[in-house]
Image (cartoon, grey):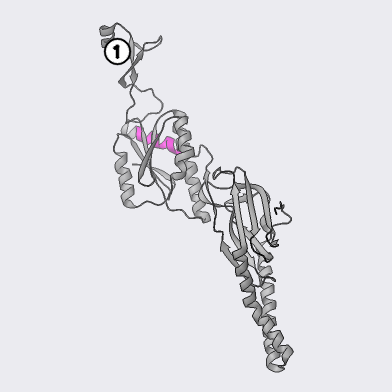
Amino acid sequence: MFKKIKNKGVKPGIETLKHRVTVPRVIYAVLLIGTCILVSNKGGAFSYVLFFSVLLYAPIAFAYILYTMWALHVYQEMEGRLLYKNTAKNYQIQIENAGVLPLSGIRLLYSNVTTHFKEDFTTDSFQLMSRESINIETELTCRYAGNYTAGIEKIVVEDFFGIFKIRFHLQTPLRVSVLPVVTDIAVKDITRILDESRLGRNIFRLDITENFLGNDLRKYMQGDSLNTIHWKNYARTGELMVRLPERQNSDMLSLILVTEDTGDDEENIKRRDLYLEYLVSVADYFAHMKKPVRIIYPDSGIKTFTIEDYKSFREFYHDRLRRIHGAIDEDTEKAMLDKSLESLSVRVMFREKDNALCLI
């Protein structure tokens, strides 16, 4: 049996949630103390029945909670696990009672730091009859870029009167990779870095045509400079051919990525979001200029990827970017620096901890 439900209320505040938990516990404590006093002062069958009824409620309630945890099955799914920041995706969650006893007092929790639901169904407390299922469909939006858990993360199970409760993590959390927005956030800093490298070494220019001719040839076309004609080849074959420019390793920037170990807490998620947005901005800048930038990053070892146009940028953005995560040790950082020395290029280190470009 499946049902579609919609949000029916306003999300309760912190004080309301505390009130829900505190009041039933206070009433239970008062009843337990009162029945103890009644048994001590008066005795009698009625007093003992009342006392043991209140006393035994606690283990019965915990047994019911444990049964609920066993019988409750929660499944969630969405359209793909590769998402775009601040872009809504269809989301579905199924809550099922696999047991024979009715279940009640079930609440679902999520992080509103990373996740936004179009219809917030978590304000409801769910009740399920035997073998009943509830199916909820809405839209989910991830607020930050990075790899983390989205959607429902925890389940709260309560007893009949809300006196006791247990909170536990979902066994199959929804892990997603969220791609950042492409902005010009890094343009000012990368322009400064390039100016510094040009003044200090005079080897990196994005605003001039390459003047180094290689050995690759093509047929002469009207408008080609006479200086590019391969005269020796013309003397030998009688056919006009021009020499194509050869890319110089010095005309490249090597960007060394020093990443940090990021957890799912708010501070780390926000830091990773800014780092990825900044990195994509750098990559987009070089793709736009049609000049090469070599990314050196950790990924089960040391990997490199060169971005020189929008085709390579799209591959980096959709495939390589989500693999860049996790803390690295000093040996890995040194190995990446050594890797950058394989070619004569401007070397820039980009540390996630500081979120700043540093010319080496």
Can I make out residue 248 in this image?
yes
- Image quarter hosting the N terminus: bottom right
Residue at 32 percent of width and 7 percent of height:
239
Q: Nearer the viewer, residue 144 or 356?
A: 144
Above/below status of 281 relative to 169: above
Q: Which residues are magenta?
A: 188-198
Residue at 34 percent of width and 14 percent of height:
242
The number of callouts visible is 1
**Residue 150: % across, % down:** 56, 52
Disc 1: CA contacts within 10 A as few (<14), some (14-19) or many (>=20): some
Q: Nearer the viewer, residue 158 or 246?
A: 158
Q: Amino acid at mark 1?
A: His
**In the figure, residue 128 lies in which quadrant?**
bottom right
Q: Nearer the viewer, residue 297 or 62?
A: 62
Can I make out residue 120 in this image?
no
**Residue 191: % across, % down:** 43, 35
Q: Is residue 244 left or right of residue 179?
A: left
Q: Is residue 333 left or right of residue 16?
A: left
Q: Nearer the viewer, residue 146 or 354?
A: 146
**In the figure, residue 74 lies in which quadrant?**
bottom right
Q: Is residue 305 left or right of residue 167?
A: left
Above/below status of 162 relative to 183: below
Which residue does the numbered mark 1 point to in the structure image?
230
**Residue 23: % across, % down:** 69, 73
Main SS, magenta region, reads helix
> Was residue 66 drawn as part of the magenta stretch in this picture?
no
Residue at 29 percent of width and 42 percent of height:
338
Q: Is residue 226 left or right of residue 107?
A: left
- Image quarter hosting the C terminus: top left
**Residue 323: % across, % down:** 44, 45
Task: Identify the residue at the far top of this view.
Answer: 238
Residue at disc 1, secondary structure: loop
